[in-house]
Amino acid sequence: MDRKSFITKISDSFNDGELSLFLGAGSSLDAHFPTWKELLTPCAEKLGLDISSITDYFQLAQYFINEYSERELYSLINHKINKFDYESELMKIIVQIGFKSIWTTNFDKVIEKNFEYQKININSIHDEQDLGSVSLKNRVNIFKLNGDIGSISKIVISKSDIENYYLNHELFLSFFQRELVTNTFLFIGYSFTDDIVLKSIQKLHSYIGKNNKAFYTIMIDKPGDKNFQLFIDDLGKRYNIKVLLVQTPEDIKEILREIKEKTISKNIYISGSLDDALEETRAYNLSKSLVEKLIDGGYNIVTGFGKNIGYYISGSSIQKLYSINEANIEKRLIMRPFAHDMSLDEDTSYRRNLISDTKFTIVMYGQAINSKGDIVTSRGVWEEIKISKEQGNYIIPIASTGFAAAELGEKIKSSITEYPYLENYIEKLCSENSPDKLAELVLHIIEEISFNFID
């Protein structure tokens, strides 16, 4: 499968709310956790076996248990896993993408810790008893098929554990198989060498047909390895697993970054504030025309609820979304008002988080009244412009509305090489006053950027 088609498919599934992530042991390597081979090398040494000749690590663990004990195996694993850091660039990207459902065969805590670093609430589900805590809204669900190191006596590590899996984890598997039906799955760092996933996919295909459900994975290529090539071919033909082959682990990170960029390419942040009664009617008409055209174009609106402008944007968006019977209003319109008692640091962090999931920033007005009663440009709007530029957003000022938007328009004119996408439009943005024509112009600019710079 080619890279562009792969990224488009995964991004579209994410934006439709139908993407689940599956992480295998390879995903923990970026946090410097051991491979299965490294984890079980002490077991092989104690058994007098050459670890390089071992292909079935569950069988190796079983031999060790038979010869020594489960307790000694758990002690070795605990020692190996608990002495490493959890920070991972790969996991950081995964967290930023915003997956709501993650499945894994890993029993370490790399996934959970990286979500905690980003202050994101999670549900760690590693036993049947935990399934009652599954949250569909405010938390990321992390399903740990092989258990958790915190309950080490229940982890799936040996051949016996694998053989009894379907008997001991029937409810867990039912949840997994249901999600295989409803969602598109992206597999990262997973080798497909145990039976749990492939048997579940096989069972699914027996009911709905192989060609009705595809799965997706990224793997590092092994040129010249005939066995690997046959394995990839088998995944495609028997399980309808589409494989994107890359050269290095860094390629996987880059593809995930591109998926992130693609998923936010429909999200538009609208920055603005206004405290002028004489301008309110025009501001309302512009806001209404703008969001109606953006929503009709398939774009999602994000607003921090700046004075008056945020009210006009959110109200007009809700009205439009209801008129088209939009089922997922919370996704199409994200409103996050600012608290009045925020510190400057909290305020900046809040703005940064709000803008981080957008690709475009539209600036209108940007006017405020200072403590002396003077009309000034809005500090908050300028800060949002700065954050948007740092993040790499495409910034579009509706400069004819004046204030911060007008000042930004003049800055862009004098440094147009930094904003090549506005070269043919900045004069019109500075002079046009018709709300409908401005809205049409902004939509045209966004669609041109999407075609020429993003796709």
Image (cartoon, rainbow, N blue to C red):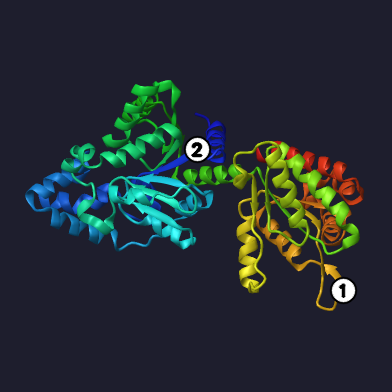
Which residue matches tag 1?
Answer: 374
Q: Amino acid at mark 1?
A: Asp
Mark 2 lies on a secondary structure that is: loop
Please identify the quarter of the rendering in which residue 329 is found. Answer: top right
Q: Residue at x 43, y 55 (%)?
A: 122
Front residue (pair 204, 324): 324
CA gap, disc 2 to disc 1?
Answer: 50 Å
Q: Is residue 275 left or right of residue 141?
A: right
* Rendered location of residue 173, percent (x, y): 30, 38
Q: Residue at x 30, y 52 (%)?
A: 107
Mark count: 2
Front residue (pair 416, 91): 91
Is residue 191 among what the camera can see? no
Which label number is shown at residue 18? Answer: 2
Please identify the quarter of the rendering in which residue 248 is found. Answer: top left
Quadrant location, the C terminus = top right
Mark 1 lies on a secondary structure that is: loop
Is residue 284 among what the camera can see? yes
Confirm or deny contact between disc 2 and disc 1 (CB under 8 A): no
Q: Earlier in the sequence, mark 2 or mark 1?
A: 2
Q: Is residue 92 left or right of residue 445?
A: left
As drawn, 86 above or below 126:
below
As drawn, 69 above or below 350:
above
* Rendered location of residue 312, percent (x, y): 77, 53
Q: Is residue 118 left or right of residue 277?
A: left
